[in-house]
Image (cartoon, rainbow, N blue to C red):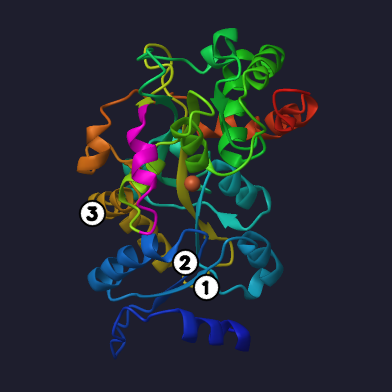
Amino acid sequence: MRWTLACAAALATLIPAYAVSLAGAEEPGEVNIYSYRQPYLIEPLLKEFSDETGIKANVIFAEKGLIERIQAEGRNSPADVLLTTDIGNLSQATASGITQPIESETVADAVPPAYRGENNEWIGLTHRARVVYASKDRVEEDAITYEDLADPKWRGKICIRSGQHPYNVALIASMIAHHGEEKTEEWLRGVKANLARKPAGNDRLQVKGVYAGECDIAIGNTYYMGKMLTDEDHPEQKEWANSVNMLFPNADGRGTHVNVSGAIVAKNAPNKENAVKLVEFLASDKGQEMYADVNSEYPVKEGVPWSKLVQSWGAFKSDPISLNEIAARRKAASELVDKIGFDEGPSS
Ligand code: FE
């Protein structure tokens, strides 16, 4: 394996070496990880993995450009595994030809087919639901559907981030999968008409909008409830969280839309065997529990206990549609957002 100088330097400075190198022929070697997910989520997992296997885990963290980087590095890429969120990134990685099928019975047994690529070229590791955060004071409903969001009774009452954000693109793609493009366009126009303001900011700022009385319902991912309740740097967010109830849409119907975080094994992985071992660890009971717990997400593997906090939100039914179906409609969803000018907000 050849490291560029810059790359080696980056590893030396950024990356703690977790495993003590073992001498001899049995040397377990290393695995190189490119991660869009943040250090506080990934480091405890890698430490556990290295402790268990003796495999040294090297990691580069970045907020963007990692898929392009692996592509540009080509056959000389040191990357073994890419860790990321969202079906958008996972399908982009697959489409850009940087993945290889992950051949592992352990992984196939742990991860339901709806949460992995058709040829296991990506593997979902945790999932999260896209829910409605409803004002405790102003919303009486204790159940809702995504379809309801277009009902004129919500005129001027909905806060949501950009329609082009991957979380919303996937949600809209799921609507297309269930209702077709025409019906979804009508629906999305209805949602746009109900917006309280121009879509902007992240999921947490939508909940803040409810807290501040700008809107009555906000759309956001489940783990942000956990973040708002526990973020020591932003204690004011606890009040935002406490001003809302979480409603899991379509609970009585097809279930709530979910998305994943996941992994791919790079096509030119120099340490392929260790890469597969890492994915197997992340799909194991221990890895699943740790990975889900640290970000208040749901393990993809059946039977792995949810964190206490996540349990407190109650059981829910997730939409069983395969994320491959959603990936196939992302482009149409994104085009629809532009077509109707969703991000221009309610007035135009
Ligand atoms: Fe997020």
The residue that label 3 is drawn on is: 286
Which mark is first along the chain, 1 or 3?
1
Residue shown at the point (46%, 47%) measured from the top left: 261
Which class describes the residues within 10 Å of circle 2: few (<14), some (14-19), or many (20+)? many
Q: In x, y percent, where is residue 334?
A: 71, 33
Residue shown at the point (58%, 84%) measured from the top left: 3
Contact? badges 1 and 2 (CB < 8 Å)? yes
Which residue is the extreme one toward the front?
212
Q: Which residues fall within the magenta stretch?
A: 233-245
Instruction: Give the Cα separation between the discs numbered 3 and 1.
Output: 26 Å
Residue 27 on the magenta span: no
The residue that label 1 is drawn on is: 270
Q: Name the front one of labels 3 and 1.
A: 3
Regarding residue 24, the answer to whether it shows in the image is yes
| Label disc, if present, on residue 249 of the rendered structure | none
Closest to the observer, 155 or 105: 155
State the image quarter where residue 239 is shown.
top left
Q: Is mark 3 within 8 Å of ligand 1?
A: no
Left or right of 53: which side holds 262?
right
Q: Quadrant of the N terminus?
A: bottom right
Badge 3 element: helix
